[in-house]
Amino acid sequence: MNAARDDETRAERARSFGRVAADYDRIRPGYPAAAIAPLRPGPVVDVGAGTGKLTTALVAAGHAVVAVEPDPAMRTVLAGHDLPGVDVRDGTGERLPVADGVAASVVYGQAWHWVDPVAASAEAARVLDPGGVLALLWNLPDVTAGWVAELNRISGQPEVTARTTPPTLPGFGTPELVETRWTQDLTPGELLLLFSTFSRVSTRAPDDRRAVLGHLRGHLARTPETAGSMPIGYPYRCLTLLYRR
Ligand SMILES: C[S@@+](CC[C@H](N)C(=O)[O-])C[C@H]1O[C@@H](n2cnc3c(N)ncnc32)[C@H](O)[C@@H]1O
């Protein structure tokens, strides 16, 4: 694939979430309390907030949140949760609709890989107060389990290893890494629904998408850890990368 086509596909995937907003909200994982415990007390800007998976955890931890999300369908689901202390705004990581120096933390849950890192670093630095922290979070499937690695391979998710190499961000120091292991209990049908919300699956042509989901279903039925086990404990390593200004 040439570079221009690659960029186009990536941009299409970045815009793909609204079409699966309801399923996304139903089945995507939330975030364990330990993953956000290192954030400073005070207001948080949650960028690429989606339907509010990370926002919900931030509210439970007592933070006031400005939730920034460019996709109108995702924003509608998020606003419908009516979370206390949450201000939902249209915007992107490259252009935050937030004043200078007002945030104790800027967080990205499963969303940093969709932004231009240079522009988004500059915007995060602009809205953070002097002691501010930029936190990038990912719920990564724990591919040390062979059956999880195989599900990942079938669905074409190459990102897991890339996420474990912390990027260097202009204006920020070396990040501190906090890792939290946890599991999401899912029936086989729910696990398939989870995979159907991944942009590498949802943006395929219908026949191709059905074929991938069929392969995933077959793998679940053949694998001792998942065949007939109700529910399946789907294992995650939740990574929090903490960058200080
Ligand atoms: C995988 S979802 C993550 C949603 C939520 N933070 C979570 O943890 O479930 C990625 C989100 O990033 C949003 N997004 C895509 N491009 C973006 C950009 N340039 N700036 C901010 N958000 C973006 C998408 O619309 C989508 O809602």
Image (spheres, helix red, strand yellow):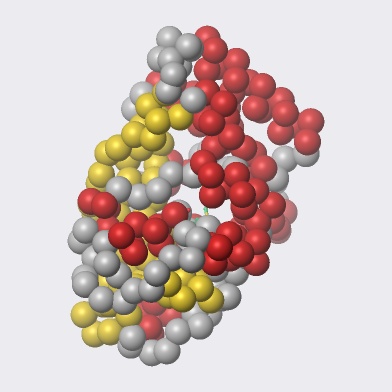
Q: Is residue 33 left or right of residue 87?
A: left
Res 100 → quadrant: bottom left
Q: Quadrant of the C terminus?
A: bottom left
Q: Is residue 154 left or right of residue 231?
A: right
- Name the residue rendered at 45%, 84% in the picture: 98
Residue 170 is situated, as x and y percent measured from the top left of the image, at 36, 74
Q: Is residue 146 above or below residue 19?
A: above
Residue 15 is situated, as x and y percent measured from the top left of the image, at 65, 59
Q: Is residue 158 above or below residue 105?
A: above
Q: Is residue 153 left or right of residue 22?
A: left
Q: Is residue 175 above or below residue 133?
A: above
Residue 53 is situated, as x and y percent measured from the top left of the image, at 44, 54
Q: Is residue 171 above or below residue 162?
A: below
- Name the residue rendered at 45%, 29% in the picture: 186
- Name the residue rendered at 43%, 10% in the picture: 224
Q: Residue furthest bottom?
A: 100
Res 39 → quadrant: bottom left
Residue 30 is situated, as x and y percent measured from the top left of the image, at 40, 48
Residue 119 in view: no
Task: Using the image as rendered, state which of residue 76 and residue 112 is in the foreground.
Answer: 76
Residue 192 in view: yes
